[in-house]
Amino acid sequence: GWALQSGTSHFLGQSFGKAFDVTFQDTDGAQKDVWGTSWGVSTRLLGALIMTHSDDNGLVLPPRVAPVQVVIVPIPPKKNDEESKMAMDNALDDMVAGLKAEGLRVKVDDRDFVRNGAKYFEWERKGVPLRIELGPRDVKNDVCIFKYRAGEGSDEKQSVALSDVAKSAVNGLEAMQNNLFQEAKDRLEAGMTTDVTYEEMKTALESDEASVYPGSGLYLVPWKCDADNEDAIKTECKATIRCYPLAENEAGMHKGKKCFYSGKDATHMALFGRAF
């Protein structure tokens, strides 16, 4: 129920230009102090990603941003079984090549000093979207085992034919990506309250209902742009405008409505809430 400030833009005026003696030549040939703006994102975005998607077992990384999208954990055959070892190596090489050909970021965890169970736990905790297990018995049966970190079917392991590994991984990771996005979108919408008066919002925030999870802490309301009124609301209940949502404003949702604070004709639909 709280907002997180992420990427922001600022108008810096000419203060930095004057401080560092940075000038430009205008159309009349005169030297002027430069005007500055800034925009950037920070590690807050990583915090947002962790809070949005992760669970009690650790990180959950959306496939598109995961440094490692697929980790393969080979289960080696017995030491003296050279035939199985050769078959295993060939199957592993083909699997890695096929996955990389699809543009996937792949890591093979072949550490021989770490137990398989510990490897599974480690990569789950690190949020790698897909773990593939491959053992000598799997190779003989021309299959491997898929285990997704999140999404539909992630509670169970899946047996996948070796010939279908690359295609199945691409489709599965895309499905996981879409699922995580939709779940996050649904949570956001569930945490937004509409059709409220200012007093109702103030009472809810002052009673700390916004700190309950899951709960409503964001308020989409008709608003007449007024800096003084915005400052007053911030003083009264620590809520600020987080943004003017594009979809609602482009659709003209504010037209014909009165500002929930001043009672004047609304100019925007504004999203109010407290922020970290």
Image (cartoon, rainbow, N blue to C red):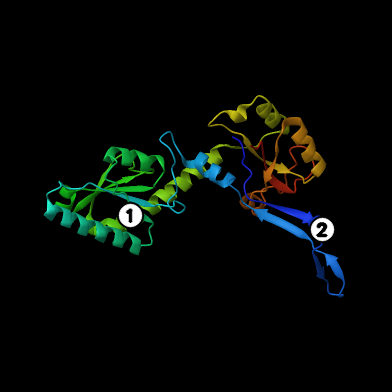
Say whether marks 1 and 2 touch (CB < 8 Å). Answer: no
| Left/right of residue 165 with respect to residue 252 in the rendered view | left
Q: Secondary structure at mark 1?
A: helix
User: Up-down: is 147 above or below 28?
Assistant: above
Name the quadrant of the N terminus: top right
Q: Is residue 205 above or below residue 20?
A: above
Percent of width and height locating residue 253: 66, 48
Marks 1 and 2 sit apart, C-alpha to C-alpha, by 52 Å
Q: Nearer the viewer, residue 147 or 70?
A: 70
Q: Is residue 103 visible?
A: yes
Query: Which quadrant of the view contains residue 258?
Result: top right
Mark number, residue 14 = 2
Which part of the image, by quadrant, shows the C terminus? Answer: top right
Name the foreground residue: 72 vs 181.
Answer: 72
Tell me if I can see residue 263 in this picture: no
Mark 2 neighbour class, 10 Å CA radius: few under 14, some 14 to 19, many 20 or more: some
What is the crowding at mark 1: few (fewer than 14 residues within 10 Å), some, or many (at least 20)? many
Is 251 situated above or below 59? below
**Could you tell whether 58 is left or right of 6 in the image?**
left
Count of numbered labels shown in the rendering: 2
Quadrant hosting residue 96: bottom left
Q: Position of residue 228 (x, y in %)?
A: 82, 41
Does residue 121 appear left or right of residue 247 in this picture? left
Q: Give me the disc on residue 169.
A: 1
Q: Which mark is residue 17?
A: none
Most foreground residue, 256 or 77: 77
Residue 195, position in %: x, y? 65, 37
Query: Going 34% across and 64% down the picture, which residue do you hit?
Result: 101
* Residue at the extreme top: 207
Q: Secondary structure at mark 2?
A: loop
